[in-house]
Image (tube, rainbow, N blue to C red):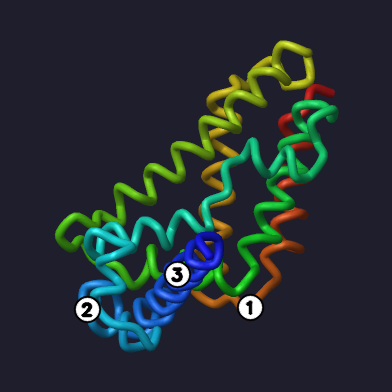
Amino acid sequence: MARRTKAEAEATREALLSAAEEVFFDNGVARTSLEQIARHAGLTRGAVYWHFKNKADLFRAMLDRIRMPFEELVAENGATDASPLETVRLGIQLSLLRLEQPRHRRVLAILVHRCEFFGDIDPLAMQNEMADEACGALADYFACAARLGHLRDDLSPVIAAELMQAMLGGLFHDWLRNHERFSLVAKGRELVDTQLALMRRA
């Protein structure tokens, strides 16, 4: 019985997060109330407060569902035995595949385009946190590549990571504005392969 109750509670939490995605996307974060989210999920506002302290807590939980720590992507892709630069390539490929999924695209569109600074919700700080996390992971792999002699001598690991992060950020924002213009995966693979080739020691 306890297991069933726990499963039901988790199902309720997931339903609220999915409802929040849809209502935030339609209305924007500031103009969405917890009451609206509860109604959209077919639940009461009390159910929302059982699982989340406030709207900011719910918003962060929604973001956490689509967070992709680079080390997890590497492990999932089976790239743990690959060279550092190949590991970067494979990890980014998997992240691009994830980003093209409707949930990831919708949540990130909310964060970038439909979320104003509101109460405890600071969308720029959240975007910076995610970007810094990704850039730090990339820098670690580029540092390993440099130690192995795989990276160009005139390119520091930090600059290599910042170049890759800047390219991916620009690509992502171009795609997010109109995701039907091009395939993020296809264009991303082309650009990443080209950039890694330019970074690699001849």
What separation in Å lies between label 1 and label 2 (alpha carbons)? Answer: 33 Å
> Which secondary structure, mark 1?
loop
Res. 176 in view: no
Closer to viewer: mark 1 or mark 2: 2
The answer to whether the residue labelled 1 contacts the one labelled 3, judged by CB atoms less than 8 Å apart, is no
Closer to viewer: mark 2 or mark 3: 2
* N-term-proximal mark, 1 vs 2: 2
**Residue 59 as seen in the image, left or right of residue 190:** left
> Which secondary structure, mark 3?
helix
**Residue 49 as seen in the image, left or right of residue 61:** left
Q: Where is residue 25 shown, x and y percent of the image?
A: 39, 79
**Residue 183 as seen in the image, left or right of residue 159:** right
Q: Which residue is mark 1?
A: 181
Res. 148 in view: yes
Residue nearest the observer in this picture, 186 or 140 = 140
Q: Identify the residue at image location x=72%, y=39%.
A: 74
* N-term-proximal mark, 1 vs 3: 3
Disc number placed over residue 109 in the picture, else none: 3
What separation in Å lies between label 2 and label 3 (alpha carbons)? Answer: 19 Å
Q: Where is residue 135 shown, x and y percent of the image?
A: 52, 35
Q: Which residue is mark 2?
A: 33
